[in-house]
Image (cartoon, coloured by chain):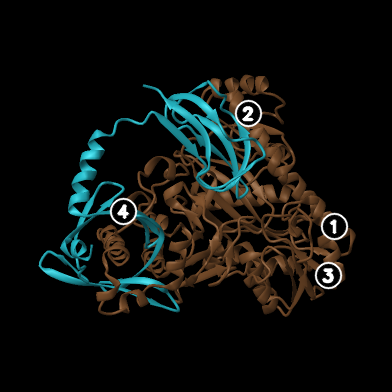
Amino acid sequence: MGNEKAKIRKLYAVSSGNRKYVFSNPLRDNIRIGNRKYDIKLKQDDKFGTYILWKNRKYPVEVVRSRQNRYEILFNDISYVFTIETPFGYRRMKVLSRQKGRKEKELVRSPMPGKIVDVLAREGSQVLKGEPVVILEAMKMQNEIQSPVNGTVTKISAKPGVIVNKDDVLVEIKVEA
Amino acid sequence: MSIKRILIANRGEIAVRIMKSARKMGIESVAIRTAVEPSALYLSYADVVFDNTDDESEIPVFLDIDKLINIALKTGCDAVHPGYGFLAENAYFADKCIDNKIEFIGPSPDAIYKMGNKTIARKIALSNNIPMAMGSQGNISNEEEAVKIASKIGYPVIIKAASGGGGRGMRIVRKPEDMEKMFIIASKEAEKAFNDPSVFIEKYIENPKHIEFQILGDKKGNIIHLGERECSIQRKHQKLLEEAPSSALDEKLREEMGSMAVKIAGAVGYYSAGTVEFLLDSYRKYYFMEMNTRIQVEHPVTEEITGIDLIEQQIRIANGEELRIKQKDVRIKGWAIECRINAEDVQAGFAPDPGKIEKLSMPDDDYVRVDTGVTAGSAIVSSYDSMIAKLIVKGSDRRDALKKCKLALDKVWVKGVKTTLPFFRMLIRHPKFTGGNFTTSFIEKDLDQFYYNSEYEEMLAAWLATKLFIEENLTDESIKPDFSHSREIDPWLLNKRISQF
């Protein structure tokens, strides 16, 4: 196993927007832009916590979550999600993504913790993209949770008065063909 | 001065703000410690802290009129400052204070009631010839009536809560088919938020600017205005950035709108600080929207350009003092911008992101003012609003203020929760915003991305993800030459990572 690990010379960080960044393994602490190399330093201290020092500026960084080869990084208050792939894994990923078809079912999830005030969707009813399906109250505001697609409501998990967490499934919609 | 001790019936940054002015005036403050935030920063500014942590009631103490009156009496307060939100615009609370010989630092219960009820406020504005958008005569009882009136006024219309404010119970309706659904949503929201389901309808002014005038009035009937604030940068009627003055007004329009604001305040015998809100359309016609009978979140921008401490004025007025500032003494100097740095996830539709603030560092330049109720280690709790701090920047003119704001935004450092900072970093670079060419629909219509990141930020984030991947998966512990890399990573960062599994 140690030998196999040592053989990996290159890694790809693929962003959720499908941009690909190539890094060498072992990872260098600098990045070349044009003709110049710039040092990257990962540091931490009591005042700022963990940060990256780049071109004389500090940028706050945090790892929000990681699972297997998927990393959600908070960099300067913005989230980025990457999957890290070996050259072999990257080729496989590209093949798989080509085979993957269109989504058939859409899960409408709660974007924030809150309380369900009202469920506007009915099981079996047609909804249009942008149509409010659930009213969620969070931090003193009532928020319309809208359907992201045109389709038919197949299941309703949200119930008025119930407290939900972020990412809880509220409604399932069968996507219109 | 007869006011000697004030109960601060509020929390967070506004509690801190009020206590700072009180201390400057030699007045003592009493703050309330709650179980939700037992070690909040505002408590450290108080002369006396009333411990209410054993209160098991479901309603927050800041909304509990009887309890607040009791605390005020028990702690020997002769005045109460309500701040904003909570009971700040509750006429019954103001009345109760007076009944108990406690000075309510705000306007009279009568003025709060009249301006708080939007249908009454509309009638007052109408009878005083204040320009207003066309609308329903009074409240609307059902969706059929709503459809009938809307067709008379012409779409689009806006449904508003009669007892509303802060954007709740408000819905824009563009076609008759949507009226029923929107009417029900608005009415339900109004009932939930204000305990009053009544709503009314107004012609919806498309793409207006939000211009509001700061008012000060004393109990002798003197009323002045301190110029305007522009609060057009808002999302779902929640203001995000405010500035004073506004680039949309010239001296003539300022004088005209200012005198209208003074007139409507006078019509209800207004005293204390208040705000008259107008919409300004693209033809520079203005319409009275509502009057807020309290100190506003965005009051610092007015303070910065006029040099007047509004909280101090509120206290003096409550104390019965006559306004020493006359209209002709009010001089507007410079330009101020306020950014509301909230714990919100800009990438997830500004969803609140409550949590513990791990690190917090604010710029200390002399052109920056920071009003905050938190510090490193504080928590943004989901029971209250998501504000972390107000970053207020002052420049000699708008251009200078924008330049300084850009610098200041890069110096704000918050870790632990996501913030609205990336939004402001984008906004401050947006040509429509810097050109002054924006309306209340700016966020909804003119933006395709809600945040700013420089060219290399994603690449640097990718570098970090790759680094962690290598450390977790490809590093053979036995041959790992040194341990320095792992030591560089914050243990908290590692904890947070592990806890996700």
Residue B44 on image: x %, y %? 66, 76
Tell me what residue is drawn at x 17 percent, y 53 percent: A87
Which numbered circle lies on residue B183? 2
Instruction: Give SS at disc 2.
Output: helix
Q: How many marks?
A: 4
Q: Amino acid at mark 4?
A: Phe
Name the quadrant of the N terminus of chain B: bottom right
Query: Which residue is identified by label 4?
Result: A82
The cyan one among the chains is A
| Direction from residue B176 to residue B207 in the image, left or right | left
Q: Nearer the viewer, mark 1 or mark 4?
A: 4
Secondary structure at badge 3 equals loop
**Sooner in the amino-acid sequence: mark 2 or mark 1:** 1
Q: CA distance from mark 2 to mark 1?
A: 34 Å
- Position of B271 with respect to B413 (left or right) is right
Q: Residue B235: x and y, percent?
A: 50, 46
Please tell me whether mark 4 or mark 3 is closer to you in this view.
4
Q: Quadrant of residue B99?
A: bottom right
